[in-house]
Image: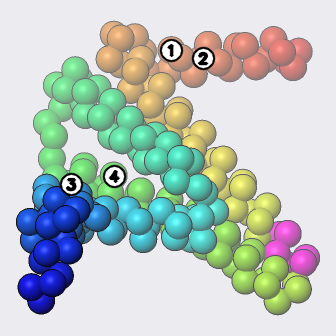
Amino acid sequence: MKYLYKLLATFDYESLLALGQSLAPSTKYNLTIASLFISVALPALDRVFGLDGYAFALLLMVFTAELSSGILAAHIRKETLSSMKLSRFSFKVFYYLVLISMPYVLAQSFLAHNKTFASTMFDWLHLFLLSQIVLENIVSILENVAVIDGKDKTHWIAKIQAKVNTLFGS
């Protein structure tokens, strides 16, 4: 054991702990559990939700933007915040994540079993639900931003509808 400490000292490590902290510096700041969670969770995101880490982070940002803009809009409307509203939001996000992951996992399972028709069907459903969920959250954020700006909640949506109608000649 003495030899090991002498060897460590030649590399300017005063102990095994110092070597460990050099190899995993997050241990100095008690970030080991967080870094392990991130290291394990990020690769799983692709397998569960069909999204890479950046896309999933953006999805979480959309959820966070909806929540924070909703809280601010409620404050402006002089509505009281309640745990019920936060619970409703959490419940909604949970089901959104289930609706995103379920068709993706099924599509991958069918693909692994060479059932291409079923895989294609669930892959399409995954993309449809993901797109629809993101669009619904964007609409909600735009309603909240309109309220925050002191406008009617339909202000931004009406502008988008008008633009789409002019593009498609309706």
> On the image, numbered disc 1 is attached to which residue?
155
The front one of 29 and 163 is 29
> On the image, numbered disc 3 is attached to which residue?
84
The numbered mark, 3 or 1, whose residue comes first in the sequence reads: 3
The front one of 166 and 16 is 16
> On the image, numbered disc 4 is attached to which residue?
89
Alpha carbons under labels 1 and 2: distance apart = 5 Å
The numbered mark, 2 or 4, whose residue comes first in the sequence reads: 4
Alpha carbons under labels 3 and 2: distance apart = 30 Å
- Majority secondary structure of magenta residues: helix
Q: Secondary structure at mark 1?
A: helix
* Residues in magenta, as a range: 116-121
Would you say 151 lies left or right of 104 here? left
Alpha carbons under labels 2 and 4: distance apart = 25 Å
Q: Secondary structure at mark 4?
A: helix
Q: Three-letter amino acid code at disc 2?
A: Ala
Alpha carbons under labels 4 and 1: distance apart = 23 Å
